[in-house]
Image (spheres, rainbow, N blue to C red):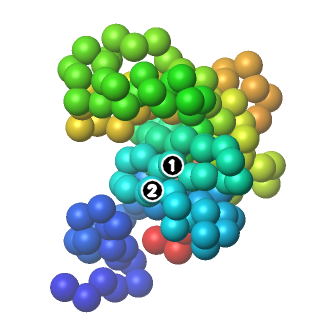
């Protein structure tokens, strides 16, 4: 099926869909593309995790779902699939429990949002909490609720379908 101008192709399943997309995401943390070719060659990036050496220091990232509740559709969400940095200790804890069903009991871990979202005010380096979920499910990313950033307010208060439509237009979906 060839998508029409009203259709979009899902980056996950590769199928064409019509209507609004209820999520967008990033293949890597912003720092990956900003890193030198040499640092990327020494690093590792897959669909869920990233290790990036910068000089003598290693930086760790995990992909997660930053969900915004939809006020127009109670129980539904719009999802930004984003990357968050983790400290070395949090990285070790995360990888030690990667396939462990009990990982859902881990305390949320502090991180920094590592992608730039279309908010007019930069989102990279917003404080977040990474909540691990069951194996096979990416972590939930929670923006620090005390933040005055519009993204934090949207996560707390929800967004409308009009806002989802705006994200679709920005993304070209």
Q: In the displayed structure, would residue 2 be above or below residue 39?
A: below
Q: In which quarter of the image is the N terminus?
A: bottom left
Q: In this view, does 142 lie to the left or right of 144?
A: left
Q: Position of residue 85 (x, y in %)?
A: 59, 39
Say what secondary structure mark 1 lies in: strand
Image quadrant in which you'd find residue 97: top left
- The residue drawn where x is 33% and y is 73% is 9
Who is closer to the viewer here, 74 or 35? 35
Q: Where is residue 73 in the image (x, y as percent from the top left)?
A: 40, 37
Q: Is residue 72 left or right of residue 159?
A: left
Distance between the alpha carbons at the discs numbered 1 and 2: 5 Å
Image quadrant in which you'd find residue 40: bottom right
Q: For the residue carrying disc 2, how many other residues have a C-alpha within 10 Å: few (<14), some (14-19), or many (20+)?
A: some
Who is closer to the viewer here, 55 or 90? 55
Q: Tell me whether the residue at label 1 lies in contact with that at label 2, contact meaning CB atoms closer than 8 angstroms.
A: yes
- Residue 89 in view, yes or no: yes
Q: Where is residue 133 in the image (x, y as percent from the top left)?
A: 33, 26
- The residue drawn where x is 40% and y is 27% is 94
Q: Where is residue 115 in the image (x, y as percent from the top left)?
A: 62, 52
- The residue drawn where x is 69% and y is 30% is 127
Q: In the displayed structure, would residue 90 be above or below residue 58?
A: above
- The residue drawn where x is 67% and y is 53% is 54
Q: Is residue 143 left or right of residue 119?
A: left
Q: In the displayed structure, would residue 3 be above or below residue 138?
A: below
Say what secondary structure mark 2 lies in: strand
The residue that mark 2 highlights is 44
Q: How many marks?
A: 2
Image quadrant in which you'd find residue 21: bottom left
The residue that mark 1 highlights is 51
């Amino acid at each position: 099926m060839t998508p029409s101008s009203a259709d979009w192709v899902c980056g996950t399943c590769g199928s064409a869909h019509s209507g609004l997309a209820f999520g967008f995401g990033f293949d890597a943390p912003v720092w990956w593309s900003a890193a030198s070719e040499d640092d990327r060659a020494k690093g590792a990036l897959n669909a869920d995790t990233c290790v990036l050496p910068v000089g003598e220091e290693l930086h760790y990232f995990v992909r997660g779902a930053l969900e915004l509740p939809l006020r127009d559709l109670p129980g539904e969400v719009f999802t930004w699939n984003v990357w968050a940095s983790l400290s070395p200790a949090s990285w070790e804890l995360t990888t030690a429990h990667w396939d462990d069903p009990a990982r859902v009991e881990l305390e949320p871990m502090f991180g920094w949002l590592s992608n730039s979202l279309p908010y007019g005010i930069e989102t990279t380096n917003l404080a977040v909490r990474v909540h691990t979920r069951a194996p096979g499910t990416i972590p939930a990313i929670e923006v620090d609720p005390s933040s005055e950033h519009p993204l934090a307010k949207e996560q707390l208060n929800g967004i409308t379908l009009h806002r989802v439509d705006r994200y679709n237009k920005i993304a070209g979906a």
